[in-house]
């Protein structure tokens, strides 16, 4: 049977396992692993909650308050993005309690991406919601110290399934088995099976490879078409829930009744994303029916990511109020790669800027209203993608620099001896 899940009609009876799973998972996403004043904005119906927009720099995510009058949080997810002389990776998350107001369905967000007050790197986002409240679009412009880069974006709401799904849990290398049973009007059942190895990762340069699945930004559903090597047109709809991936495919072939083929395949993962069962069915224009079964199993049998590093301060004098931190962490690039950084329990709402160069990540944090440096809690939480089959340990990470400033910008007398880190592997 002809599809990326099977070899369909036209005398093609051998099942194509790797093409099947490549298509079934290709439309998924991101994973790691096993200010402006508020009031006065006009309400926009049904736009409250989280939104996501793919961009040239990576992804733009933002959240609208429950009454639809302001954007209260924005995240810039940079993916090896180069503007001028700088290449940026990681996540910058900025919150605004009063919100960037939405007026006449329009909003503007401006953020300084550099924690150093002497260097301005402004990101400006403009956006407009459509009349239905189901789509938004706009522009972005990054005015960095040696270049200005810009582009457009289109966003859609993130469903409940999207917010509960961490697509990085799908990353890894899998053993695959797949069985196809074909039953035609003039012949009995014919069964064929294949096994193989499949890698699921986010390197877009490898997405055309048969044994590699590229996972782009997460969507709960996506429909797209392509023309195959025979000139036939396949239309795919991929639907993703918390632990399932469903692929529905319809084919159009020249000179034969439409549809030329149709399939419906479902992959259901276990709660640790270490294995999945595959089942489905289909038919072609000759009247042949197809049933599919199969499985995915991680090649090492374990979930290897992400690794989460929690950073806390220690030995800081009581009553010390801090306004900024500068932390540099060396890591073993053969075992992990930097993914993102988020505020800790002591620093909600802080502006955080990561700068990663492949084996060292520098994190700058500014919290305008300050935080208690002597309090119990975390200051930042970093996430690293694991390079299989490694299992990182604390020895794979070293804090080489830690400095802190008070609310006036003066040095607070804190260094790397005042830091405590712990890691957790999923």
Image: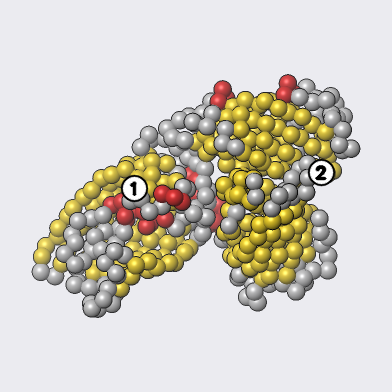
Residue at (26% x, 67% y) in the render: 230
Q: Nearer the viewer, residue 81 or 198?
A: 81
Q: Residue 94, percent across and down?
A: 72, 50
Residue at (82% x, 62% y) in the render: 38
Looking at the rendered structure, the secondary structure element under dot 2 is loop
Q: Residue 2, percent across and down?
A: 25, 63
For the residues labelled 2 and 1, the Cα–Cα distance comes to 47 Å
State the image quarter where residue 361 is shown: top right
Residue at (76% x, 57% y) in the render: 110
Residue at (66% x, 67% y) in the render: 138
The answer to whether one can see residue 314 in this image is no
Which one is earlier in the sequence, the residue at label 2 or at label 1? Answer: 2
- Quadrant where the image shows the N terminus: bottom left
**How crowded is the residue under tag 2: few (<14 C-alpha within 10 Å), some, or many (20+)?**
few
The mark lying in front, picked from 2 and 1, is 2
Q: Which of 98 and 406 is in front in this view?
A: 406
State the image quarter where residue 86 is shown: top right
Q: Residue 211 carries which label?
A: 1
- Is residue 21 depicted above or below 261 in this figure? above
Q: In this view, does 156 lie to the left or right of 17?
A: right
Q: Residue 180, percent across and down?
A: 22, 56
Q: Which mark is residue 302?
A: none
Q: Residue 425, percent across and down?
A: 53, 33
Q: Name the residue under label 2.
A: 117
């Amino acid at each position: 049977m002809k599809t990326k899940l099977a070899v369909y009609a036209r005398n093609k009876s051998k099942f194509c396992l790797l093409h099947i799973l490549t298509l079934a998972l290709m439309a998924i996403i991101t994973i790691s692993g096993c200010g402006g004043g508020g009031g006065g904005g006009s309400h926009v119906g049904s736009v409250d909650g989280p939104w996501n927009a793919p961009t040239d720099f990576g992804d733009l995510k933002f959240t609208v308050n429950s009454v639809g009058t302001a954007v209260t949080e924005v995240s810039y997810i940079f993916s090896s993005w180069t503007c001028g002389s700088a290449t940026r990776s990681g996540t910058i998350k900025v919150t605004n309690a009063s919100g960037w107001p939405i007026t006449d369905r329009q909003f503007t967000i401006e953020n300084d991406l550099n924690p150093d007050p002497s260097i301005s790197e402004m990101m400006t986002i403009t956006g407009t919601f459509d009349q239905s409240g189901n789509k938004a679009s706009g522009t972005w412009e990054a005015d960095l110290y040696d270049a200005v880069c810009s582009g457009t974006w289109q966003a859609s709401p993130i469903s409940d399934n999207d917010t509960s799904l961490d697509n990085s849990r799908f990353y890894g290398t899998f053993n695959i088995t797949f069985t196809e049973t074909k039953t035609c009007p003039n012949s009995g059942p014919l069964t064929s099976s294949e096994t193989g190895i499949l890698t699921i990762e986010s390197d877009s340069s490898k997405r055309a490879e048969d044994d590699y699945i590229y996972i782009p930004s997460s969507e709960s559903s996506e429909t797209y078409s392509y023309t195959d090597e025979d000139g036939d047109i396949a239309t795919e709809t991929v639907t993703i829930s918390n632990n399932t991936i469903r692929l529905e495919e319809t084919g159009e072939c020249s000179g034969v009744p439409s549809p030329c083929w149709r399939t419906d395949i479902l992959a259901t993962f276990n709660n640790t994303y270490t294995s999945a069962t595959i089942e489905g069915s289909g038919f072609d224009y000759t009247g042949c029916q197809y049933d599919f079964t199969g499985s995915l199993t991680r090649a090492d049998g374990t979930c290897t990511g992400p690794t989460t590093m929690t950073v806390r301060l220690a030995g800081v004098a009581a009553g010390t109020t801090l306004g900024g931190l500068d932390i540099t962490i060396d890591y073993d690039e053969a075992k992990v790669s930097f993914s993102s950084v988020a505020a800790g329990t002591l620093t909600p709402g802080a502006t955080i800027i990561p700068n990663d160069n492949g084996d060292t990540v520098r994190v700058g944090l500014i919290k305008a209203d300050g935080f208690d440096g002597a309090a119990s809690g975390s200051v930042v939480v970093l996430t690293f993608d694991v390079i299989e089959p490694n299992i990182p340990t604390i020895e794979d990470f070293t804090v080489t620099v830690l400095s802190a400033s008070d609310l006036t910008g003066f040095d607070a007398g804190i260094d790397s001896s005042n830091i405590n880190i712990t890691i957790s592997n999923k």
